[in-house]
Amino acid sequence: NSTQPSLPRSKQRETQRNGAFEFAADAFANNVATQSLSLLRNMKIHNLRNSAAKRFGCLQCGKNFRCYSQLEIHQRSHTGEKPYRCTLCGKRYAQKGHLYTHQRTHTGEKPYRCPICGKGFIQKCTLDMHQRTHTGERPFVCIKCGKGFTKNCNLKKHLLVHLEPGLNMCDVESDSATFSVLRTLFKRFECLFCGKMFNYLSSLKVHVRRHSGEKPFSCSVCGKPFAQKTYLKLHQRVHSGEKPYSCPNCGKSFSQKSSLNIHLRTHTGEKPYSCLGCGKCYAYKYGLNHHQCFNQTTQ
């Protein structure tokens, strides 16, 4: 039996190192490929959930929703409909959750308690704001000096100290950043429910009705209440049959201008919604969403 000459030990160690390196390189490549496939799969799932899955579009503003029930709730922001009524005070709400929150003002229930001092709150957002008094957290930071605040409204008031004295609107408009700050500062009226700021007290009063459920404008025909006079006027056209917006091409009339604008696309051929993937265009946003959903599910 002939025996092959054995390799020197240094050569054997080098061969072993090379083999180990190749094995590690293959394992690394396989791991990267697996992670890439997993990332691609997750991206497809994310896109399906966040774009194509939103198949129900609002004809008023174009906003899209995953299910029809969400669209129905959203449409109440346009119609002013509030089907959920408090049996104790008669206030009405667009969503059942808002009614439940309101009912706590009658029952005294405060399910959200501070773990530090035990103080109770009706809403979680109010508890979160309160806890900053204990933790010292100041999430709203001034971009000019770095000072932090517990509330966004306090930050807006603070920004005033950075404006130069005697600064007029002509000087400010030349600096878009400063103009943005000044425009924010003029929002002096704050909603005590959510902290949103308004330029005018009248705007704040209208906004607060979203929290309180107050609807001071009632239809004289059917008694349906509305939070704003404009919503009442739109609703009254249901009874009067008034359609003040007419198509100049075919004469068809509409009760709302937004409905006329959508209808006009049938004459102009305008298709403002285009697919980024294939370039196909659609006249309505829900048509584009349906197209994207179909392509996602067939891939």
Image: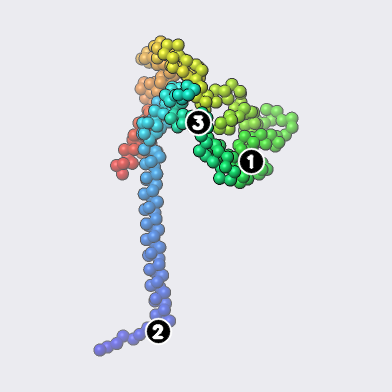
Residue at the extreme bottom of the image, as rendered:
1
User: In the rendering, which numbered label is found on residue 8?
Assistant: 2
Number of residues whose C-alpha sits closer than 10 Å to that of mark 1, classed few (under 14), some (14–19) or many (20 or more): some
In the depicted view, which residue is nearer to us: 33 or 76? 76
For residue 204, above or below residue 112: above
Element under disc 3 = helix
Q: Amino acid at mark 3?
A: Thr
User: In the rendering, which numbered label is found on residue 107?
Assistant: 3
Q: Marks 3/2: CA distance?
A: 89 Å
Pointer 1 residue: 149
Name the image quarter holding the C terminus: top left
Residue at 45% across / 11% down in the picture?
A: 220
Residue at the extreme front of the image, as rendered:
107
Residue at 49% across / 16% down in the picture?
A: 217
Dividing the picture into quadrants, the one containing residue 272 is: top left
Element under disc 1 = strand
Residue at 52% across / 30% down in the picture?
A: 105
